[in-house]
Amino acid sequence: MKRALTLLTALLTSSALTSATLAAGPTTLREAAGDRLLIGAAISMPQIEDPKQAELLTSQFNSIVCGNDFKPLYLHPKPDVFNFETADKYVAFAEAHGLKLIGHNLLWHSQAPAHLFQDESGKPLPREQGLANLQKHITTIVTHFKGKVIGWDVVNEGLADSEPYLRSTPALKSIGEDYIQKAFEFAHAADPDVELYYNDYNIEKPYKFPKALKLLKALKDAKVPITGVGIQLHCQLTEPKTPAELEAAIPQFAALGLKVMFTELDVDVLPRKASGADVTAKEQGANPYTAGLPADVAEAQGKYYASIFQVAMNHPGVVTRVTTWGTDDSTSWLNDWPVRGRTNYGMLFARDLSPKPAFADVMKVLTAK
Ligand code: G3I
C-alpha cells in the first residue's frame, strides 16, 4: 500500500512537472526558434574554452560563426602557408555539440593578407596573377572545410559606402569588377554543396540598398552560384528606422531567389557617429554606463531587438538565420568600436551571462502564436 502511494505521488509529481514545463514553453532561443530559423552567435576562443561560456552558447544557439579565426589573414597568412589549426578547433567543437558552422569569410578588404592581390611594393598584381591567387586561396580553404561548414560568406563588404558602386579594394584593383563573380565560382567548384553568401552592412538602408540590388541582380543574371545575402545589422538604439527598411528590402532580395540572413546582429546603446560597421572608423565618445545599464535603456534595447526578430518571423522560409555578433556584453567588439575601451551592452546576455530584458523580448516574439 505504502509502495503504491509512493508510486502514485511520484507519477503525479512527474506529470505536474511535465505540464508545468509544457505550460512554460521553450526556455532557450534555439528551442523557441525550432526549425524555423537558425539562431547563431559569432564566437572566439573564450566561448569554447570557458565552460560557462560554452554552456551558454550550446544551450541557446544552434549555429556559430567565428568572429575572427576564419578570416583570410589567419587562414592564409603567406602565399604558400595555410593555417587551419585554430579554425579546426571550432570545427571539432561544432561537431561535438551538433552546431551548424558558417565560414566567415573568404574575401574581405580588412584582416586580409596583402600577398593575394598586391606585389611587395603595394602595387596591384596583374589580373591573371590576382585571379590565380584568388582561385588557389578559395579552393584550398573551401576544400579543407568541405562537409564541415554549411555556408560561406564568400565576399564580405564589397560595396562602397560613399562611391557609387563597388568598394575600391586590392581585389578590385587587381582583377576588376568580376572578382566577386569569380570568388563565388571558385567556391562552388571546390564544394558544390556548400551555401554561398554575399555579406554586407547597411544594405537595407536607402543609400546602399540600390547598390546591393544591382550587384545581386548582376550575379543572378550571370548565373553565379549564390545562395543568399547576409544583412549584417550592426544597429544603434538611436536609429530606430531599421525595421521598416529591412521589411522593404527582404522581398526584393527574395525575388532574386536568395535566402536572407541577419548575420551580425547587435544593438549598440552608446552614442557613436559611425553607422554600420566600417572597421576603420575611430572616434572619441562618451562612456556613460560604466556602472551598469539603466533599466529604461535596457528596455528600449529589448524593444529594438524584438522588432528585428519580428521582421525575421514575418518572412518565414525567406529569413533563414539570425546570428548575433557575439554572445554576451563582455566579449562584444562594440566595447572597442568605434571608440576604444568603452563599457558597451550590445548583446542579449549580460557580462555575468544572465539574460537581459532583450532576451525575454526576443523569446516573446519567437514563441508568439
Ligand atoms: O589578436 C590581436 C591581439 O594579438 C592583440 O593583442 C590585440 C590588440 O588590439 O588585437 C587582436 O586583434 C584584434 C582582433 O579583433 C581579434 O580580437 C584586432 O585588434 C581587432 O581589430 C579585431 O576586431 C575585429 C574586427 O572585425 C576587425 O576588422 C572584431 O573582433 C570582429 O568582431 C570584427 O568583425 C567584423 C566582421 O568580420 C565583418 N563585419 C563587421 C564586424 C565588426 O567589425
Image (cartoon, rainbow, N blue to C red):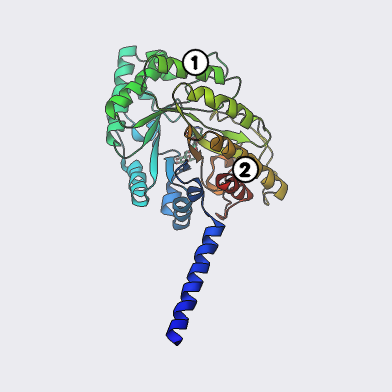
Of residues 99 and 238, which is closer to you in this image? Answer: 99
* Count of marks, rendered view: 2
**Of the residues under marks 2 and 1, which one precedes in the sequence?**
1
Please say if 300 is above or below 230: below
Say the numbered circle drawn on residue 164. Answer: none
Q: Secondary structure at mark 1?
A: helix
Query: Camera-side residue: 272 or 235?
Result: 235
Q: Disc 2 versus disc 1: distance between alpha carbons?
A: 37 Å
Q: Quadrant of residue 277?
A: top right
Closest to the observer, 243 or 269: 243
Q: Is residue 55 visible?
A: yes
Q: Nearer the viewer, mark 2 or mark 1?
A: 1
Q: Is residue 82 rendered to the left or right of residue 300?
A: left
Label 2: state its secondary structure: loop
The answer to whether residue 153 is left or right of residue 341 is: left
At a point 69% along the width and 39% down the height, the residue shown is: 286
Instruction: Find residue 59 and report its horizontal and vertical position in percent.
Output: 46, 53
Indicate yes or no: mark 2 CB to ligand 1 under 8 Å: no
Q: Amino acid at mark 2?
A: Arg
Identify the amino acid type marked 1.
Answer: Lys
Q: Position of residue 27 (x, y in %)?
A: 53, 55
Residue 251, percent from left and from top: 53, 25
Which residue was labeled with disc 1? 214
Camera-side residue: 38 or 48?
Answer: 38
Query: Residue at position x 62%, y 32% from top?
Result: 243
| Within-10-Å neighbours for mark 1: few <14, some 14–19, many 20+ | few
Q: Find out if the beta carbon at label 1 lies less than 8 Å from the nearest ligand 1 atom.
A: no
Q: Which residue is mark 2?
A: 342
Q: Where the N terminus falls, by quadrant?
A: bottom left
Q: Is residue 137 visible?
A: no
